[in-house]
Image (cartoon, rainbow, N blue to C red):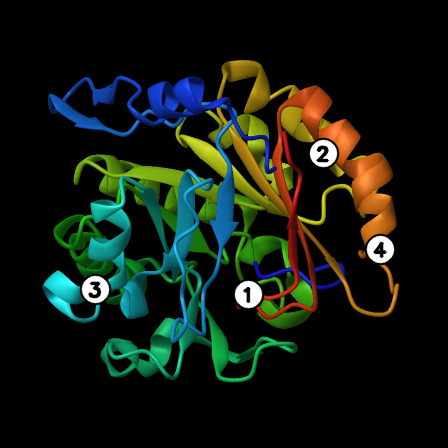
Amino acid sequence: MKRIVQSVCLSCAMMLSIAACQANPQSYPSHGLTWWSVPLGLSWMWQLQDYENFKIDPEIDVYDIDLFEGSEGSAQSLIHRLKSANKKVICYFSAGTREDWRSDAGDFSDSAVIADGDMDDWPGEVWLNIANRDVLENNIKPIMAKRLDLAAASGCDAVEPDNVDAYANTDETHGIISADDQLRYNRWLSDAAHQRGLAIGLKNDLQQLDALVDHFDFAVNEQCYAYGIECVDYQGTFLAKGKPVFNQEYYTNGREGEIDKSTFISSACRYFQSVGISSLWKTGYALDGVGVRSCVH
């Protein structure tokens, strides 16, 4: 989920970076499809809002942006601009919540959301009830399939489905969703993305890394360094299999789950570089591209 509390840039040298971005695509054995095989060592930027003055940095390999806003404008879309600049594009959408400001929010049935399942820190978001098999198959999955269709048609190289750890957020989901419910849904998301020629990243969901590493192409993590030993979980899973981990750390006032800028530069960045995690640090939790510091090569 979008983590706050509880719930790298490792740039290649220019020639290596270019080669990495052009890595051979991965294949889908039963369908003959291919998608981007995401290499280690790419620099990234994660910006999900405030695109009015968006600038493309020539030093950044991968941009992770909002699917809906990024696809607006067809040939003039942000995705098109990034692709024209030879950037790889990861497209973000929430796969585990209904966001009331999205254009397809009205497509979710009343039974698709968990009663009293509002996200405490994110107004307008309610957890989806992926434990209800009938609703999942006939309402939730078709909506997510359309979002994946949009991502493929818009030119996204990969997708980042958010909020795929509902089972672990029992304070908000009230224990309705089991770990098995989540595993089945996350594996379906992976298959559905690959069938459309899209790479897919696993967002957080640390408790299921072992079970899902072979289904996902990369990981997106928040605050694994600030929470102590969490980053180590990626070393034996995604990183061990040559799959990249894109991390972001935060700071506001030094509460739990945050590290300050000096700690990021002097300690965290050194660790991230040693294990191969591509990391960013920023002030505040708004993913607006402001106050971002990368772990530079």
Q: Amino acid at mark 2?
A: Cys
* CA separation in Å, label 2 and label 4: 17 Å
Q: Amino acid at mark 1?
A: Leu
Q: Residue at x 26, y 83 (%)?
A: 106
* CA separation in Å, label 3 and label 1: 19 Å
Which quadrant of the figure contains the C terminus? top right
Judged by depth in the image, the label closer to the viewer, 2 or 3, is: 3
Q: First in sequence: mark 1 or mark 2?
A: 2
* CA separation in Å, label 2 and label 3: 35 Å
Residue designated by label 1: 287
Q: First in sequence: mark 2 or mark 4?
A: 2
Q: Amino acid at mark 3?
A: Ser
Q: First in sequence: mark 3 or mark 1?
A: 3
| 280, above or below 106, in the image | above
Residue designated by label 3: 77
Q: First in sequence: mark 4 or mark 1?
A: 4
Residue designated by label 4: 260
> How far across and down, in percent of the image, does residue 80 sit?
20, 55
Q: Quadrant of residue 5?
A: bottom right
Q: First in sequence: mark 4 or mark 3?
A: 3
Look at the numbered disc 3 and give the secondary structure of its residue.
loop
> How far across and down, in percent of the image, does residue 183 sit?
46, 41
Q: Residue at x 52, y 25 (%)?
A: 41
Q: Amino acid at mark 4?
A: Asp
46 and 18: which is toward the camera: 18
- Checking the image for residue 231, the label placed there is 2
Label 4 with label 3: CB-CB less than 8 Å: no
How many numbered marks have been drawn onto this rendered protein structure?
Answer: 4
Label 4 with label 1: CB-CB less than 8 Å: no
